[in-house]
Image (cartoon, grey):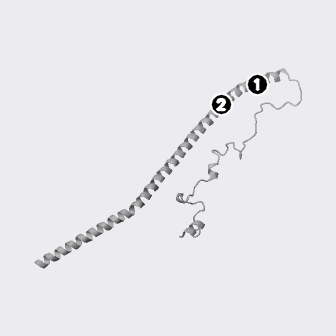
């Protein structure tokens, strides 16, 4: 396939995907939709703002009213219970926040590791390419050595043939 055909993608088989490119041609396999996809389907982000629900133990009292003793005692008991539950909820949410922070630290550390793996791979491939280029520069010298050995072998064989001929002539 010619250079123009490679550049214009002419002659490529229909079965190859348009995203299939090799590293040597500068292609990539980074799908931005996968990179930016949420870590969980329910995680809050600009596309999924979550719910705007809230907690409401008692209905809103829109009009003033009197409460009797039983209602007041029951509300006092519920208020005490909800105060304790709110304290525990704050503790739980604080722990959940710490879990999210820990998860984010692990995620970041892992991504930094992956970046280092990718950087190291590139360094290794640069070294391999440099070695391959160097080996290509040695090819002419090896060819000369090969030609020299061929000449030496031909000369030695010619000399041996001459000596054999002399020996046959004498005997």
Say if 124 sits above or below 167 in the image: above
- Identify the residue at the far left of this view: 171
Q: Position of residue 66 (x, y in %)?
A: 88, 24
Say if 3 sits above or below 84 in the image: below
Q: Give the number of the mark in front: 1 or 2.
A: 2
Seen in the image, is 46 located left or right of residue 39?
right
Task: Please give the residue where the numbered disc 1 appears in the rendered image.
Answer: 79
The disc, 1 or 2, on the residue closer to the chain's N-terminal end is: 1
Q: Position of residue 60 (x, y in %)?
A: 83, 31
Q: Tell how many labels.
A: 2
Residue visible at 46% across and 56% down in the picture: 129
Q: Is residue 73 visible?
A: yes
Residue visible at 17% across and 75% down in the picture: 164
Task: Please give the residue where the numbered disc 2 appears in the rendered image.
Answer: 94
Is the residue under label 2 in contact with that under label 1 (CB below 8 Å)? no
Residue visible at 29% across and 66% down in the picture: 149
Q: Residue 28 sits in which quadrant?
A: bottom right
Q: Nearer the viewer, residue 51 or 123?
A: 123
Q: Nearer the viewer, residue 55 or 123?
A: 123
Q: Position of residue 168 (x, y in %)?
A: 14, 77
Distance of mark 1 from mark 2, alpha carbons?
22 Å
């Amino acid at each position: 396939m010619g250079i123009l055909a490679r550049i214009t993608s002419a002659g490529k088989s229909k079965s190859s995907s348009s995203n299939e490119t090799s590293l040597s041609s500068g292609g990539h396999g980074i799908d931005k939709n996968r990179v930016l996809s949420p870590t969980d389907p329910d995680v809050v982000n600009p596309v999924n703002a979550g719910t705007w629900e809230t907690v409401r133990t008692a209905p809103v009292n829109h009009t003033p009213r009197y409460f009797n003793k039983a209602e007041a005692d029951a509300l006092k008991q519920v208020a005490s219970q909800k105060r304790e539950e709110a304290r525990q909820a704050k503790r739980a949410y604080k722990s959940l926040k710490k879990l999210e922070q820990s998860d984010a630290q692990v995620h970041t550390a892992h991504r930094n590791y992956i970046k280092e793996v990718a950087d190291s791979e590139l360094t290794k491939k640069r070294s391999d390419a440099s070695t391959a280029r160097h080996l290509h520069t040695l090819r002419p010298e090896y060819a000369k050595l090969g030609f020299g050995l061929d000449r030496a072998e031909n000369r030695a064989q010619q000399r041996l043939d001459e000596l054999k001929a002399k020996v046959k002539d004498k005997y």
